[in-house]
Amino acid sequence: MKRSMYGRYGGQFVPEVLMPALNELEEAYERYRDDPRFLEELAYYMKEFAGRETPLYFARNLSKKYGTKIYLKREDLVHGGAHKLNNTIGQALLAKYMGKKRLIAETGAGQHGTATAMVGANMGFDTEVYMGAKDVQRQHMNVYRMQLMGTVVHSVQSGSKTLKDAINEALRDWVTNVENTHYLIGSVVGPHPYPMIVRDFQSVIGNEVKRQIIEKEGRYPDSIVACAGGGSNAMGIFHPFIENREVKLFPVEAGGCGLKSTKKEALHSASLCAGEDGILQGAHTRVLQDRYGQILESSSVSAGLDYSGVGPELAHLADIGRIKPCNVNDEEALEAFYELSRTEGIIPALESSHAIAYVMKMAQSGELGDLVVVSLSGRGDKDLETVFSLKKKENRRVCL
């Protein structure tokens, strides 16, 4: 069990029927993670299909305006528009080596679902994705993209109708179909070995940054800033820098409705900042829960950060002080969405906008240092309708 734990977090809190599947997955990963043939095929897909490596872009206009040197790690340029494909390629290839014929996945913003649909179509899997009904409504273009590639999308009507509930339904499916199905989890959450596997496949982000920033600046950054929901994007860029103690690491969570929320509601939007120890979807981690241990609904303008927990490794890193959790609210994220679009000609995902917002807010405080790298986890095409509808509501209030 030792490898499955991060301090007091992690573990495998799942029905007994799933233990053989988790053991099979761990054994396969240990067998193939250093296999030359597997790594050669993985490298091929990463380069030729995903389009890696992605640029480390110097945001000169943003840097000038906010008084610090800001680089953007352009994961928005990965095929499909987000970092999610890094992990789905790795896991789908692993499932292929394991002899699985079917992929299932959960998705919030739809980017992980889309990335799963892409690899499913490309590698010949039957693919089904679970998505909360609330997210289906606000991300219907991604639903169509998945369906276009032959993926069946299940709209989950239970609970808060968001990512937490989609994961629950995917787990129920997996229990029933473990023999021929691989559950392709999209973040560093869930039971061991998923947090480790997802982190490793996403670490390509941070490994590239390590090389690129030395080439451009001759040193490591003072700070790295990344949005964090479940945490795959954050762990992907943070993990290669964990031992480099001089580099500050800032995971930025969704702070909810901000100025329009009560203090209690704001606390119900950021697991690292305000969560408590609990069990969520197969792992011990920090979760948003009431005094009876019931999971609370999260709240964010960003579907991909609308999650009631966080990856166990991030929870551990926060405990030991290696990362510095923070949060920004919806209004700040929307302001950053517009700011990057107008300043650099880059439209960020609302998830990534949270990281940009924190840099905008803190750049001149000295906390971030003189050289900052921001993980731009995805592009904002998927969020244009959400932003437009919010702007229309705001305009109506102004008119009234």
Image (cartoon, grey):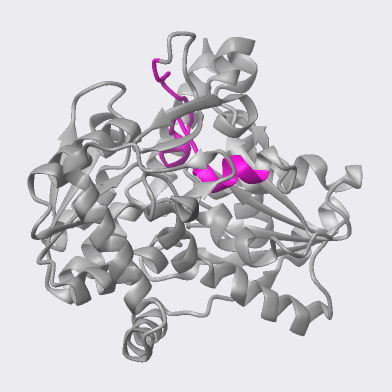
Front residue (pair 232, 72): 232
Residue 126 is situated, as x and y percent measured from the top left of the image, at: 9, 62
Whether residue 249 can be seen here: yes
Q: Nearer the viewer, residue 396 or 253?
A: 253
Residue 347 seen in render: no
Magenta segment: 294-317
Q: Position of residue 176 (x, y in %)?
A: 8, 44
State left or right for residue 89 relative to residue 299. left
Residue 380 image offset from top left, x and y in percent: 47, 52
Residue shown at 82% from the left, 78% from the top: 217
* Foreground pick, 392 / 103: 103
Q: Is residue 222 magenta?
A: no
| Residue found at x 32% / y 52% | 185
Above or below 17: residue 217: below
Q: Position of residue 99 (x, y in %)?
A: 13, 72
The answer to which image quadrant residue 69 occupies is: bottom right
Q: Is residue 303 magenta?
A: yes
Query: Where is residue 122, by image quadrant?
Result: bottom left
Is residue 224 rendered to the left or right of residue 50?
Answer: right
Q: So how many labels did they put on this image?
A: 0
Instruction: Say left or right for 26 vs 264.
Output: left
